[in-house]
Image (cartoon, grey):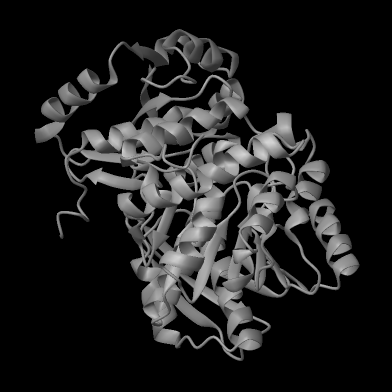
Amino acid sequence: MHAEERFAEYKQALDWLHGLLRFGQRPGLERMQWVLKELGNPERRVPFIHVAGTNGKGSTCAFLTQMLMEAGYSVGTFTSPYLLDFRERIRYNGSMIAEEDLLQLANEVRVLVDRCENETDFGSPTEFEVITLMAILYFTRVAVPAVVVWETGLGGRLDSTNVVIPLVSVITNIGFDHMNVLGDNLVDIAREKAGIIKPGVPVVTGERRPEVLAVFQDKANETRSTLYQMGTDFSGEQVEEQLGEQQFRYRSMLRRHEGSYRLTMNGIHQTDNASIALMTIDVLRNYFSFLLEEEEMFRGLQQTRWPGRLEIVSPRPLVILDGAHNQEGMEALVNSLDRLLPEGARLHLLFSGLADKPLSKMAESLKPIQSRIDSLHLATFDFPRAAEAETLQEAFHAGGWEEDKLETVPDWRAFLLSWMREKQSAKADDWLVVCGSLYFIAQVRAFFPTTVEEAGE
């Protein structure tokens, strides 16, 4: 490519980026390291908080970002996937990167991508690697925050985000996701995630299983890092919960007194995620002179919103979205619904998922609340990896569901339209929960004009 062949428009840059998907997922850091060296290692100029884990990474990053911002810190956040707009992945103080900035960074990185492909044996960087590089450049040159909350894409050890040396490493938990890349048992997956543990860098984890903790502890001993474990060094305990809020108590070895906090997000797993975020902040306060007052942390947690996680998009009729896109996600959803659903309420589910997920296992995870589910609707949606409705039906059969409970929906939009019309007058005893793939949830979310929040209620 000649220097003068630059992208003139944001959309061209985006198409180029998505075009890099053909290089797939190629574990290994050599392409990242080569490009960063050519750029003069900008990643060393800004402090990072590195967050890995199977479930809960996104929420933990959101809690951290909000608490730090509440205390007056400028915060960069790098997350994936995105819900509605690609630029959600790179944010500064909660605002998405500007199209103009993304365009300029794409032009700069593109030259290096071509060089890496042509001048080295490493081949072309992948889409995710290029986005990671652009995020590093954005946070070190354009919007230079006081700290960056940095979420891994996949795994840890060979993930392209693993080129930074953070102040703190966070591993939320370990579950069975991306087994084709990371290994098919918990200990192997734990080894991959433990790859983000760096020499002397403290680690906070929400994992509780002894065989997984043993892997983390070994790695921490090897790197002389301190490992802070949930349930031992810090803990969060839910006090009460209703739809739209919960309260919990938190204590930690780095504090004299326990604290009480409120979340507007539901689910006991959010208490865990918020506790992990609090412990991370405690480490920053104790060892890195970060200044956050108790009320700033309180407000930060209370104000954190995370779209698509037990999110109410319509109060009447009640419609809730939840991106439970793997087995653990489904189990967390079931757990929450079981506790939140009032006696006598009728539960209806609209589900869609990706063909490459363990669909029958996910269907099986719903079994504990089978008796409370009035109807279950299965739909496909417009996405290359989406499972067909018939495939979903087979998966639910395999997962132990009776034929008469299941209904395939030819068009989910038409289904939702008629649902909203019919149930407009309904009492609050009909709950519709839309769940499954986050890509599906994103489309459904766009279908609802504005959420309660954005309407400013």
Give the answer, above or below, for where 231 lies relative to 434. below
Could one spot residue 287 in this view of the protein?
Answer: yes
What x and y, as percent, mark residue 381?
A: 37, 20
Residue drawn at x 45%, y 86% is 294
Choose between 416 and 110: the one closer to the eye.
110
Choose between 203 and 429: the one closer to the eye.
203
What x and y, as percent, mark residue 314?
A: 21, 43
> Image quadrant of residue 222?
bottom right
Residue drawn at x 62%, y 62% is 50
Taking the image as shown, residue 53 lies to the left or right of residue 139, namely right
Give the answer, above or below, for where 166 lies relative to 56. below
What x and y, as percent, mark residue 167?
A: 65, 74
Residue drawn at x 66%, y 71% is 168
Taking the image as shown, residue 7 lies to the left or right of residue 57, namely left
> Image quadrant of residue 7?
top left
Locate the C terminus by quadrant: bottom left
Could one spot residue 47 in this view of the protein?
Answer: no
Choose between 305 and 123: the one closer to the eye.
123
What x and y, as percent, mark residue 62?
A: 45, 61
